[in-house]
Amino acid sequence: MKANHLINSIYRATEGEGIFLGRPQIFVRYQGCAIGCVNCDSKDTWEFTESMGKSLEEVMAAIHTEGLNGSIKNISITGGDPLHPAHVPHVLALVKLLKEKKYYVNIEAAGTRVVDDIFDLVDFISFDFKTPSTGVQTPLKNIAKMISQYPGKFQIKAVIADEIDFKKTLHAYIELESENIGRHNPWVLTPCFNNHEEFPMERFSQVMTWNELEGGFFRVIGQQHKWIWGPDQKQV
Ligand code: SF4
């Protein structure tokens, strides 16, 4: 059994953001990310730490245990960056096995890559649109590819720190979805809630107001787990 899945953690929690908000699921968090978002709230997942390797059998066993002996069948594969080329063959093997065992699999994608082998198999893709405050760019051609290949099977999530982030997301939406408004692919604005800060009430209400005034194309969904546990708590 090769311990080639670099795993930060496997845990049960209630989804705190995006369109699956409130749904209990098992998070499989891969260790290792080379994307480098400035406002990343999981910097502890960046290093590709070989000593955190687990075999596929160990990963499945942990999923079974955390899922209360298989009674929770919703999985979110996240990171780190589970679509980094170093992870892809292992994530693919995991997804195949999870689908054989009838799990519902969501994968969190950073927006920098479309990995068809994995996207074809999973049930849903949560695809980031990286806003200027992250310091990273999502090529619009990636989202255009998602729209043409995976309609109805993904959400776009954008972290909004300020009005520049909002405007950039709005322009991307209008460019890409102007003929498809409100039909298939939800776009979610996540008002930024940084580590070590108090709940950002002003930022949150501004994002809702901008959205209302510009036509209401987006769903504004905060990070519920941070309201409950605080912004620095892990595995919640
Ligand atoms: S892709 Fe995710 S884990 Fe990687 S730097 Fe960005 S926010 Fe952090």
Image (spheres, helix red, strand yellow):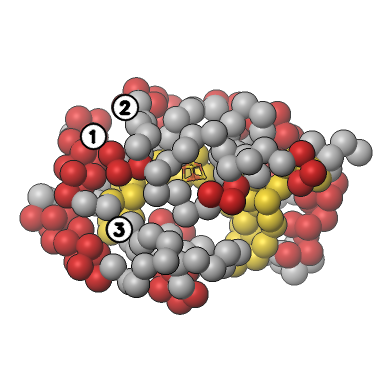
Please give the name of the residue rendered at 62% of the width and 56% of the height, measured from the top-left corner: 27
Q: Is residue 79 left or right of residue 174?
A: right
- Please name the residue that numbered disc 3 is placed on: 191
> In the rendered view, would you say 149 is above or below 66?
above
- What mark, if any, has residue 140 been given in the picture? 2
Please give the name of the residue rendered at 71% of the width and 41% of the height, measured from the top-left corner: 49
Type of amino acid at the residue the image marks with label 2: Leu
Q: Is residue 225 left or right of residue 162?
A: right
Label whose residue precedes the other's in the sequence (3 or 2): 2
* Residue at the limit of the structure toward the left, as seen here: 213
Label whose residue precedes the other's in the sequence (2 or 1): 2
- What mark, if any, has residue 122 been given in the picture? none
Q: Is residue 70 left or right of residue 111?
A: right
Of the 4 image quadrants, the one containing the C terminus is: bottom right
Residue 117 location, x and y as percent?
61, 26
Q: Secondary structure at mark 1?
A: helix
Q: Residues within 10 Å of mark 3 (few under 14, many from 20)?
A: many
Q: Are marks 2 and 1 in contact (CB under 8 Å)?
A: yes
- What mark, if any, has residue 172 been given in the picture? 1
Q: How many marks?
A: 3
Type of amino acid at the residue the image marks with label 3: Pro
Residue 148 location, x and y as percent?
37, 26
Of the 4 image quadrants, the one containing the N terminus is: top right
Image quadrant assignment for residue 19: bottom left
